Image (spheres, rainbow, N blue to C red):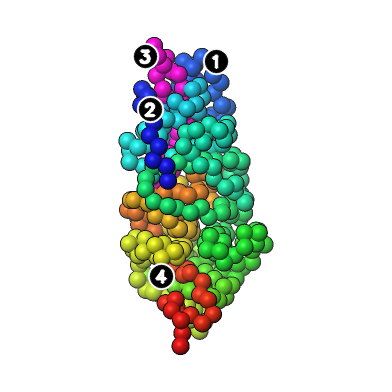
Amino acid sequence: MSSQQETPVKSIVVPFEPGTSPALLSRLGHHEVPERWHTVDRSAHAPHIVAVVGDDGEGWAAAALVTARPHTAYLKIVDAVGDVQAAVAAVVADARGRELAQVKWEGWTARPEDAAAAGFTALDAPLTQSEGAAGPAAGYVRWLCDGVVTEPPYYGQTTHFTCGAVTALVAQAHAGTLPGEALDRRAELTLWRDATNFLACEPVGLGVALRRAWPSSPVTVHLDTDRPVLLDHLPEKEQEWRAVLQRTSRADAERIGVPVDPRHLPMAAIRDAIGRREHVLLLLSLAGMQGFDVPHWVLCHGVVPGAVVIEDPWANAATGDTWVDAHLLPVPDSSLDTMSAISPDGFRGAVTIGRPQRPGTSSSGTAEE
């Protein structure tokens, strides 16, 4: 991760308000403000302008539109105008001052050479983008902390209900168990079909489907309730038959040897699992990051000081959210722990996937006699 330092620049931070920003940005003179700054309501992601003060001490030499999902540990540059290098350096300095883990830069207008000169690394292009969320073709990241986080492929879920299947597939691709070319819509829908509780994937059913698809991958389900889950929003008749399917999934788990741990998986255990090069599929509520309390699966695959790095297969186009936000997303431990309590009664669910076992090894990875 980059430890490159910037030459200090004099900058200011002002809120981005569509009604007043054109007047503020007119100080840049001939520099055109991208129309996309005004095409969506970014207010949920704390939009602000980081501006570099010119040599005269009054005008602006550069500016960047910056946003971020709430309760996360990054900033995202949507665009930089004027003296691009100065604008980006000012954003990085602002992120450092906030002790954030990373700065991202959407590739709408960013040139690869400018990103590289500013210490950013190109993100791999997404295999798909989530339904309705057409983000930029390119994106860049600069880490501001120590550590090594390897990049999984980014695959945006192609339906509103296949987040569980997608996170599992991305985990297996990141582990090398699933060939990259096999990560496609057919695989997404096939795994979802085996795991679904119509329409959601509940933890036990997802764990059972994973074990069936990859028998050599150790799987453990973590679910701190023994009642059916993710059904409270449905009428009683709809809950009843789905509960039958969840009980069947528990019987299948016992039959094929998928442990169901009845305890909550704490952040320390998630960090330990990632340290062992395992993957954690975590069920969380989108209330904190997106503003609505909907259960959603994400993949925990990396750690940095103070934050867990996740892959979110969904982006909220209505707020200007794109795959650049959702990919390699650092979330503070305390925030992620809060998000993982699923209403109405605060249950928690997760699935851990261990490193694939070679024939002739035990679950601990040692050779069998």
- Relative to 144, say whether 350 is above or below: below
Marked residue nearer the N-terminal end (2 or 3): 2
Residue indicated by mark 2: 7
Residues at marks 3 and 4 touching, judged by CB atoms closer than 8 Å: no
Residue at mark 2 to residue at mark 3: CA–CA distance: 17 Å
- Residue at far top of view: 56
The location of residue 261, given as percent across then percent down, is 39, 74
User: How many angstroms separate mark 4 from mark 2 (CA)?
Assistant: 48 Å
Few, some or many C-alpha atoms within 10 Å of disc 4 (few <14, some 14-19, many ≥20)? many
Label 1 packing within 10 angstroms: few (<14), some (14-19), many (20+): few
Q: Amino acid at mark 4?
A: His
| Helix, strand or loop for disc 1 | loop
Identify the disc placed on residue 136.
Answer: none
Question: In terms of image quadrants, where is residue 277?
Answer: bottom left
In this view of the protein, which residue sits in the foreground, 189 or 346? 189
Residue corresponding to mark 1? 30
Identify the residue at image location x=44%, y=58%: 300
Q: As displayed, is residue 39 above or below residue 218?
A: above
- In three-dimensional space, the C-alpha distance between marks 1 and 4, rounded to whole angstroms, equals 57 Å
Labels 3 and 1: the sequence-earlier one: 1
Q: Nearer the viewer, residue 20 or 79?
A: 79
Identify which amino acid the numbered label 3 is placed on.
Gly
Tags 1 and 2 touching, CB below 8 Å = no
**Residue to which mark 4 is pinned:** 222
Magenta residues (range): 51-76
- Residue at image mark 3: 57
Ranked by sequence position, the earlier of labels 3 and 4 is 3
